[in-house]
């Protein structure tokens, strides 16, 4: 794995949360918090990234992540270009690295990459010029580091001390990059009671999620937790998984208001979206008063601003004519 940190300890790339120290994560969360504004207030804007170009290179569909990376970069004053699946020259047979070298020649400084193939963000990071940063916006089922950070920021805003929390991650754990990044970030932040809850066929391999309690019933899995994190069923990554049909899945694993009563009365409910309402979560819960799902979206922009600001760091100069 390419080293994500520079010699001075700041972030150069963000490919995974796995190797980051608690201090690195807390520094990013603290910075992200400075970019959070209440709904209806003007979002923060700055020129910190003036003269910097950010390319969003997405070869898998995305709504929130792509838009929030774009807004984050623009609010910091960067130029942004978006390349999507059909536009990407990869479908013409040009390799990912050739696309990346082209962008590099066009003076792109930060490449934000989402890809269905494991290892692509790391491959790109290992091959770009020293001044270029690579940020993963979702790597296959493996990781989604900015999602992990925005999830941690959301929990921190509501619950303060990670060392006291019970968190249940529920649903399609096996195929979920969101679950894997959540696991790494919450372990690193010291969450003592981290559980995964899924039907047997959607639980991960035994060697993964070390230290988590595994549950196959929702009621027991969320009993007395402070945070219930629901996941989307990842049909696109499934192949031949033995799964109950939608109605049966909802009757066993769908989060309804009645089921939520097994968690603590002040428990918060999260979901990375897009949601399958009526399959993994009831609308009453998704839109209910314990839901912080919309906070997650708002925090996504703040977290991506913090990450962009850190990876660009002192390279962002506003002197006309060059850097
Ligand atoms: N948006 C998240 C992701 O890209 C969650 C999901 O798609 O289920 O992984």
Image (cartoon, rainbow, N blue to C red):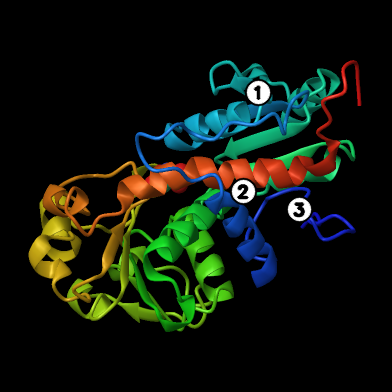
Figure disc tally = 3
- Determine whether the residue tagged by mark 3 lies in a helix, strand or loop: loop
* Residue 245 sits above or below residue 121 on the image: below
Is residue 192 shown to the viewer in this render? yes
The residue under label 3 is: 11
The residue under label 1 is: 90
Residue lying furthest left: 258
Q: Pointers 1 and 3 in contact (CB under 8 A)?
A: no
Dot 2: few (<14), some (14–19), or many (≥20) neighbours within 10 Å?
A: some
Picture coordinates of residue 163, whole percent (x, y): 48, 82
For the point 74% across and 25% down, the residue is: 50
The residue under label 2 is: 118
Is residue 117 shown to the viewer in this render? no
* Residue 123 sits above or below residue 51 on the image: below
Ligand 1 lies in quarter: top left
261 sits to left or right of 3: left
């Amino acid at each position: 794995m390419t080293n994500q940190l520079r010699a001075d300890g700041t972030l150069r790339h963000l490919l995974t949360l796995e190797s980051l120290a608690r201090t690195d994560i807390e520094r990013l969360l603290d910075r992200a918090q400075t970019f959070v504004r209440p709904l209806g207030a003007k979002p923060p804007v700055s020129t910190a990234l003036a003269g910097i170009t950010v390319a969003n290179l997405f070869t898998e569909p995305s709504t929130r992540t792509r838009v929030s990376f774009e807004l984050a970069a623009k609010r910091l004053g960067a130029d942004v270009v978006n390349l999507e699946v059909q536009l990407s020259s990869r479908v013409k047979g040009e390799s990912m690295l050739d696309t990346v070298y082209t962008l590099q020649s066009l003076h792109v400084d930060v490449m934000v990459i989402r890809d269905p193939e494991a290892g692509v963000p790391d491959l790109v990071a290992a091959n770009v010029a020293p001044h270029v940063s690579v940020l993963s916006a979702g790597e296959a089922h493996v990781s989604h580091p900015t999602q992990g950070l925005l999830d941690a920021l959301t929990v921190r805003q509501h619950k303060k001390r990670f060392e006291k929390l019970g968190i249940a991650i529920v649903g399609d754990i096996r195929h979920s990059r969101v679950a894997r990044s959540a696991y790494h970030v919450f372990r690193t932040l010291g969450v003592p009671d981290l559980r995964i809850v899924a039907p047997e066929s959607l639980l991960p391999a035994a060697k993964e999620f070390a230290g988590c309690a595994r549950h196959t019933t929702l009621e027991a899995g969320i009993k007395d937790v402070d945070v219930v994190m629901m996941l989307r069923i990842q049909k696109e990554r499934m192949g031949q998984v033995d799964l109950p049909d939608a109605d049966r899945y909802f009757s066993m694993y769908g989060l309804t208001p009645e089921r939520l009563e097994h968690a603590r009365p002040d428990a918060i409910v999260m979901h990375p979206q897009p949601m399958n309402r009526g399959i993994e979560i009831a609308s009453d819960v998704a839109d209910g008063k314990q839901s912080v799902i919309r906070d997650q979206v708002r925090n996504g922009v703040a977290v991506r601003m913090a990450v962009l600001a850190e990876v660009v760091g002192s390279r962002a100069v506003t002197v006309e004519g060059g850097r």
